[in-house]
Image (cartoon, grey):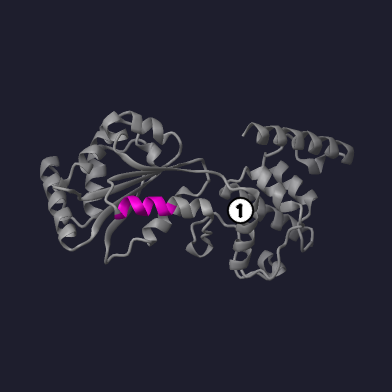
């Protein structure tokens, strides 16, 4: 019997691969999307979403792209995969994705082509939007100056291009490389980690989408998952998935706290995997962890 058959699931509930079916519209993500859409619909020019690793920035970028219908927007999503990107590459890719045919090799000619295309989009009654994911990779003044130049493509009383940056907190340092660009940020939102209540709803939502008829975790387990994951969705997925798989290997249909502690240890979220410790040591280790987490929460 497979993992999915064991639990009666249609699909894996906690895969970290992008899948729109599993999108969970938490209050944090809803508030972020509301602000970013406001920036675009109001032609604010530049908006920024900042968040920690695994907090759902890429998921939100894809969700926003899905919320930009073609009859109202000419939109694109660019992912910065490394820090060696050049201004010429950025300009050419944006031109291509916004519909410029055969972008010129000369920068001035290409800017003219892009400006003409933006005017066409505006004449059609639509807005041009470029979403930049992993924007913390834009680590040079020249790149920031290029984006500032793109934001200067406008007509009297209206900007022709809206740009939204999605990135880690290091994105703040990138923006600081060009102070005039940093001053043009019209909307900025910091995506925080989930609360324990949101984590509970998030896990239940993903299980339901996967076809689960019940929650496969004892009552005390989800708060533990939240603590070990720090409220980060990507880690919540990883821990939850490993917990289910471990319970499956043990021929159990529910995850108990012992499995949760063991998984957290194996993933390096504890100093020692608790499954390898005597019970007395386990209790001491758990007490120490609880005290540490309580102190961290008080500081926050």
Is residue 7 visible in the rendered structure shown here?
Answer: yes
Q: Quadrant of residue 297?
A: top right
Residue at screen point 32% across, 64% down: 69
Is residue 1 visible in the rendered structure shown here?
Answer: no
- Rendering coords of residue 148 (x, y %): 24, 38
- Rendering coords of residue 239 (x, y %): 66, 50
Residue at screen point 42% across, 41% down: 167
Residue at screen point 29% across, 29% down: 179
The residue segment tinted magenta is 33-41
Give above or below for 171 relative to 61. Answer: above
- Rendering coords of residue 106 (x, y %): 12, 42
Q: Residues within 10 Å of mark 1 (few under 14, many from 20)?
A: some
Residue at screen point 78% across, 54% down: 256
- Rendering coords of residue 92 (x, y %): 22, 47
Report the quarter where the N terminus lies. Answer: bottom right
In this rendered view, identify the residue nearer to me: 49 or 278: 49
Asked if the magenta segment contains residue 213, the reply would be no
Report the quarter where the C terminus lies. Answer: top right
User: Circle 1 sits on which residue?
Assistant: 198
In this rendered view, identify the residue nearer to me: 117 or 279: 117
- For numbered disc 1, what is the local secondary structure? helix
In this rendered view, identify the residue nearer to me: 203 or 36: 36
Asked if the magenta segment contains residue 37, the reply would be yes
């Amino acid at each position: 019997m497979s993992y999915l058959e064991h639990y009666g699931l249609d699909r894996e509930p906690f895969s970290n691969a992008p899948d729109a079916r599993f999108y969970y519209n938490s209050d944090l993500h809803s508030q972020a999307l509301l602000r970013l859409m406001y920036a675009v619909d109001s032609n604010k020019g530049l908006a920024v979403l900042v968040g920690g690793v695994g907090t759902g920035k890429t998921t939100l970028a894809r969700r926003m792209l899905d919320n930009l219908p073609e009859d109202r927007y000419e939109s694109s999503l660019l992912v910065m995969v490394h820090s060696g990107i050049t201004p010429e590459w950025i300009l050419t890719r944006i031109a291509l994705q916004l519909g410029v045919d055969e972008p010129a090799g000369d920068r001035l000619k290409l800017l003219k082509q892009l400006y003409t295309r933006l005017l066409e989009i505006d004449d059609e009654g639509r807005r041009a939007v470029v979403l930049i994911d992993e924007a913390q990779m834009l680590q040079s003044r020249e790149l920031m100056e290029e984006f500032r130049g793109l934001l200067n493509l406008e007509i009297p009383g209206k900007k022709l291009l809206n740009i939204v940056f999605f990135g880690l907190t290091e994105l703040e340092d990138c923006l600081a490389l060009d102070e005039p660009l940093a001053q043009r940020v019209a909307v900025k939102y910091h995506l925080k980690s989930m609360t324990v209540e949101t984590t509970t709803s998030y896990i239940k939502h993903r299980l339901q989408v996967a076809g689960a008829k019940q929650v496969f975790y004892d009552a005390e387990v989800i708060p533990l998952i939240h603590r070990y994951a720090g409220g980060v969705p990507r880690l919540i997925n990883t821990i939850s998935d490993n917990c289910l798989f471990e319970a499956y290997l043990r021929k159990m249909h529910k995850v108990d706290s012992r499995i949760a502690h063991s998984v957290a240890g194996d993933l390096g979220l504890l100093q020692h995997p608790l499954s390898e410790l005597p019970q007395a040591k386990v209790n001491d280790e758990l007490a120490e962890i609880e005290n540490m987490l309580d102190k961290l929460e008080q500081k926050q």
